[in-house]
Amino acid sequence: MNWSIGIDVGGTAIKAVVVDAEGTILKRKSLPTNDGADSVAEWTQNARQIIQDFEKEIGSTASSIGISAPGLAAADDRSIAYLPGKMEDIQGFNWTEALNRESLVPVLNDAHAALLGEAWIGAVQGKQNVVLLTLGTGVGGAITSGGRLLKGVIGRAGHLGHMSLDIDGPTSNCGTPGAIEIMIGNYTVQERSKGRFSSTRDLVDAHEANDPVATEIWLRSIRALGCAIASYINIIDPEIVVITGGISIVGKTLMDPLNAVLDEVEWRPGGHQVPVVFGKLDMWAGAVGAAYAALHPGEF
């Protein structure tokens, strides 16, 4: 049987899947990790343990392995070339060598991998022109055009969270003033609420309980998101926009006001409206995309 392991490496957890060539997820596993001084050793140990466990359970050797991680993937697909801030130890770390594999272990940006996963067996199967947004600690993104993942010259394409909506606003970690991720990312909730709320979950819970302050903050964040999506639609002209990440679990509390904003600000020539949907693979999208890239070398 031709099967692949996809491993999504993050600062708090490593998530892994076994997927066969037809796109059936056979197994899943998640292990906590630690973005600290010994992160590389821990990531490697956990990844090797996951591979060993999967191969023992399946009873054969994985045909291929792929890695998903934050940051810009290197041109040779062997490592993450650049990642400012957290998880800096992962920069330049060669996963093919670390996992003792003879064939390439492709390494992808995590949002790029998530879009590949959703396009393969998720919410946007069969779609050729897609915008994906990951809403979580910050805002990540990815784009496919004509069925191909848009990477750009150095792998920077798809960093949609760093679109500027306010030229006088605070800067993101990429130096962009008034970036959309500052306006909706979880890491700015305390600042946006002047210390009243510590997480998006707290903010949304208060909004759903009819707290007027929480409602004002939340709806302003959603308006910013809607304006950003309308801008992506004008620039990229996608078939569909897919939203994933931790913030997406609030469901209708996000989608209903977002659709109201898009009804106001989206340019719809001839009545053409771009659908906005939630992803289907949840926390496993990056791992599934990494497995796809490993099974289809050179096609992503």
Image (cartoon, helix red, strand yellow):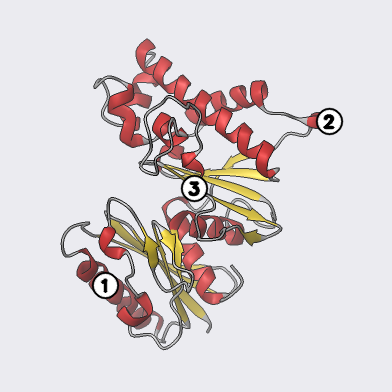
**Among the 4 quarters of the image, the one containing residue 185:** top left
Is residue 199 depicted above or below 99 in this figure? above
Dot 1 lies on which element?
helix
Q: Between residues 204 and 170, which one lies in front from this camera angle?
A: 170
Q: Amino acid at mark 1?
A: Thr
Counting from the top left corner in percent of width and height, residue 167 is at 47, 27
Q: Which residue is mark 1?
A: 44
Q: Which residue is mark 2?
A: 270
Is residue 130 depicted above or below 7 in this figure? above
Dot 3 lies on which element?
loop
Q: Give neighbour class at mark 3: few <14, some 14-19, many 20+ (Cα, 10 Å).
A: many
Q: Give neighbour class at mark 1: few <14, some 14-19, many 20+ (Cα, 10 Å).
A: some
Q: Earlier in the sequence, mark 1 or mark 2?
A: 1
Q: Between residues 50 and 213, which one lies in front from this camera angle?
A: 213
Is 267 on the left-hand or right-hand side of 71? right
Q: Is residue 100 visible?
A: yes
Question: CA–CA distance between discs 1 and 2?
Answer: 53 Å
Is 97 on the left-hand or right-hand side of 37? right
Dot 2 lies on which element?
helix
Residue 159: mark: 3
Q: Residue at x 71, y 58 (%)?
A: 146
